[in-house]
Image: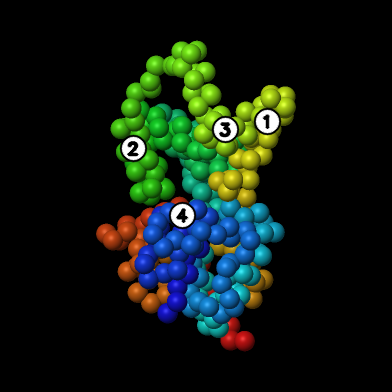
Amino acid sequence: MNYLNLGCGKRLHPSWTNVNFVSTGTGVIVHDLKEGIPFSDQSFDVVYHSHVLEHFAKAEAEIFLKECYRVLRPQGIVRVVVPDLEQITRMYIQCLENVCVNPQEWHHKYDWTLLEMYDQMVRNQSGGEMLKFLLRQDLPTQEFVVKRCGIEFQNIIAASQQLPKPKPKDGLITKFVKHIYRIIFYRDYRRNAFLKFILSPNEFDSLQLGRFRQSGEIHQWMYDHYSLSVLLENCGLQKIVNRAADESYIPNWTSFNLDTEPDGSIYKPDSLYMESIKPDL
């Protein structure tokens, strides 16, 4: 079978054709998926993408899924993984009800759940408030966060414990030398220096914000099992089912360790997993 993993990040498998927006490993094909999928019609038996669809605007998401349909052979499988809006919302309601009764125990859980819902849609810098929360040395809800979001967040928390202490600030001469060095050797720094010269501070900040908002980190939409099933159906797909992380139409699914770890744990527990089949033409 021919397998296609779109927006693979570092979650890839050598048996699959792995495509990502930037290079993340040996053999990964670099391509901007907003420009379509760079393969011919009916090239694959399976198309999979995890935590990719939510980064497309609502209108663009249907175009992207129709591209998945195009490169899929008849009776081929589409597996889509996204953050689960229903799960996050139910957790928010639970935290809200409990924090009013027992704020000491639930306050930080409530704060984290709000960040899960909103931060990646509204943040103005990489990592946003979620990263600040995870980097706290006295992180009070580590077990709760890891249970909600999985090993990726556990690794961020562990890495934060090893961060070096901030270095003393550079003096004026050192800052000037570094500035000149970056202008000479770094094109992006040189371009930004020019833009700062011709734009007002507010104009430059707005430009930087626009760049970040278009960088791909922001979530553009959220899905529950109903809205995602409707979207898949609108793209011509059939036999739409809501799956667990270790369930699939794909033979020997868990052997690829894309949604699960070798020990059987779930990579992103806050996810919605849905599959569908392309009908015979």
Closer to viewer: mark 2 or mark 4: 4
Q: Are marks 2 and 3 in contact (CB under 8 Å)?
A: no
Q: Residue at x 50, y 38 (%)?
A: 127
Q: Which residue is mark 4?
A: 23
Residue contact at pointers 2 and 4, CB within 8 angstroms = no
Measuring from the top left, give residue 261's x and y in whole percent. 32, 59
Identify the amino acid type marked 3.
Answer: Tyr
Vertical arrangement, residue 272 with respect to residue 126, above or below: below
Write down the residue under mark 2: 159
Please, which residue is most extreme toward the left here? 263
Which badge, 2 or 4, is on the more N-terminal residue?
4
Q: CA distance from mark 3 to mark 1?
A: 10 Å
Query: Which amino acid is tagged 1?
Result: Leu
Marks 4 and 1, the one that precedes in the sequence: 4
Image position, residue 25 (x, y; %)? 40, 56
Q: Is 9 above or below relative to 251? A: above
Report, in whole angstroms, how far the alpha carbon at label 3 lies from the one at label 4. Answer: 22 Å
> Closer to the camera, 77 or 210?
210
Q: Quadrant of residue 120?
A: top right
Q: CA distance from mark 4 to mark 1?
A: 29 Å
Q: CA distance from mark 2 to mark 4?
A: 22 Å
* Label whose residue precedes the other's in the sequence (1 or 2): 2
Instruction: Identify the image quadrant of the N terminus.
Output: bottom left
The dot on residue 189 is 3
> CA gap, disc 1 to disc 2?
35 Å
Q: Is residue 273 visible?
A: no
Looking at the image, which is closer to me, 174 or 65? 174
Q: Is residue 173 above or below residue 1?
A: above
Marking on residue 195: 1
Closer to us: mark 3 or mark 4?
Answer: 3
Nearer the observer, disc 2 or disc 3? 3
Q: CA distance from mark 2 to mark 3?
A: 28 Å
